[in-house]
Amino acid sequence: MTHETFREMLPLYVIGALDGDELYNFERYVAENREICHAELAEYQAIADQIALSAPSAQPSPVVYERIVAAIEEPRRPSTVVAPAQSVPAARQQPESLVPGGWIFRFIPWAAAAVLLVLLASAYNQIRTRDGLLQSMTASYNELLAKNKDQEGNLAKQRAGTDQQAKEFQARLDQLTAANQQQQHDIETLHTANRELTDEKDAVVHAADQMREQLEKQSLQTAALQKKIDDQSGTLDMMMDPSVRVAPLTDPKGETKALGKVYWVGSKRTGMMIVSNVTPVAEGQGKCLELWAICGNEPPVPAGIGYTDDSGYGRLQIKPAKDVACVDKFAVTVERSGGVPAPEGSIILIGQ
């Protein structure tokens, strides 16, 4: 059911003229749309109530009252008191207003008038609403027509100005296109020359890089050779010193073939140690070989750290951390990278 159908059936509902499916559908629609239906339903119900009560009230006559009382008491009396033949004429002589149900027939014209009034009011409201809507639409349409005419005039002016601007823009665009084509040609020429220069530069840079790598390699080799020469010269000078002391080092447990040799110049407090066949201790692995100078029962004094290659060969400079009264023995341990102030690892080589 639509709301328009609801409004058409509303006058019939308030006077009780709906039944069956129409009544069921109407009441179901009202229950589902109580917010929008309640006000209209209450308004029509109030109008119907006022029309029904607008008829003048009538006071029943004493004869009617007596007949009602007699009808109530009649079942208590014997049925032979009043002959049936005598009651028929009395009924025929009763006024129309006293006939049972007569008041119902008197109410029917009022009910019909109420229904007609409600229908007329509803139709009038609908017509008035539609007239107002039509007037509003007409005014809006006229206003839109006036605006449309103004806009058409403005558009015509704008179109004329736009056409002129378009012509000027096209002429300017043609000039820019010609200039751009010339610039593109010049740019292509420059790109070609630039590519040639780039290729030449890349070749020169590549040759320079190769020469730089060769020079770096030669510099590294030269530095290594120079260090090796310096070390050998220092070793040779040390070995040629008459005061040099040579101390062989061996594994104190005799479990490995590790060997070492210390060249110690006591007068200069310096020297060198060479080891071989020890377990490799490579630089950067978190460990190092640490040499200890021992004097009698005094605590060992750190005398230098070093590393080996993968074969277990290594060489380190001896330089005690502090002056010692004497050096009776030398010992080697494996310690944390950078060395420690007191031995933590086991002795792998010792000698005197």
Image: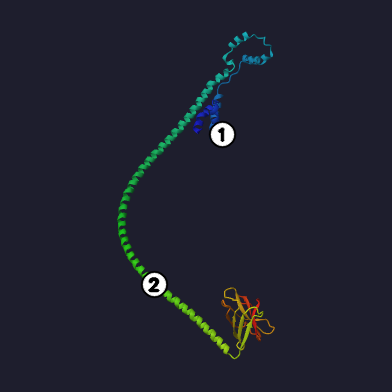
Colour style of the rendered protein structure: rainbow
Identified at 37% across, 42% down, the residue is 148
Front one among 97 and 346: 346
Q: Which residue in the structure is indicated by mark 1?
A: 31
Q: Position of residue 226 (x, y in %)?
A: 50, 83
Locate the C terminus by quadrant.
Answer: bottom right
Front one among 21 and 128: 21
- Give the left or right position of residue 199, taking residue 318 as reference: left
Q: Kindly give the residue lying farthest to the right in the view shown.
A: 297
Are the residues flagged by discs 2 and 1 in contact, CB closer than 8 Å?
no
Category of crowding for the residue at label 1, using alpha-carbon neighbours closer than 10 angstroms: few (below 14), some (14–19), many (at least 20): few
Identified at 55% across, 19% down, the residue is 106
- Give above or below for 88 relative to 148: above
- Give above or below for 334 relative to 182: below
Q: Amino acid at mark 2?
A: Ala
Q: Amino acid at mark 1?
A: Ala
- Give above or below for 191 relative to 83: below
- Give above or below for 347 relative to 90: below
Front one among 231 and 13: 231
User: Which label's residue is closer to the chain start, 2 or 1?
Assistant: 1
Q: CA distance from mark 2 to mark 1?
A: 93 Å
Q: Which mark is residue 203?
A: 2
Q: Position of residue 179 (x, y in %)?
A: 31, 61
Q: Position of residue 82 (x, y in %)?
A: 65, 9
Q: Secondary structure at mark 2?
A: helix
Q: Is residue 174 visible?
A: yes
Identified at 35% across, 69% down, the residue is 196
Quarter of the image holding residue 310?
Answer: bottom right
Identified at 44% across, 34% down, the residue is 132
Front one among 178 and 141: 178
Q: Secondary structure at mark 1?
A: helix
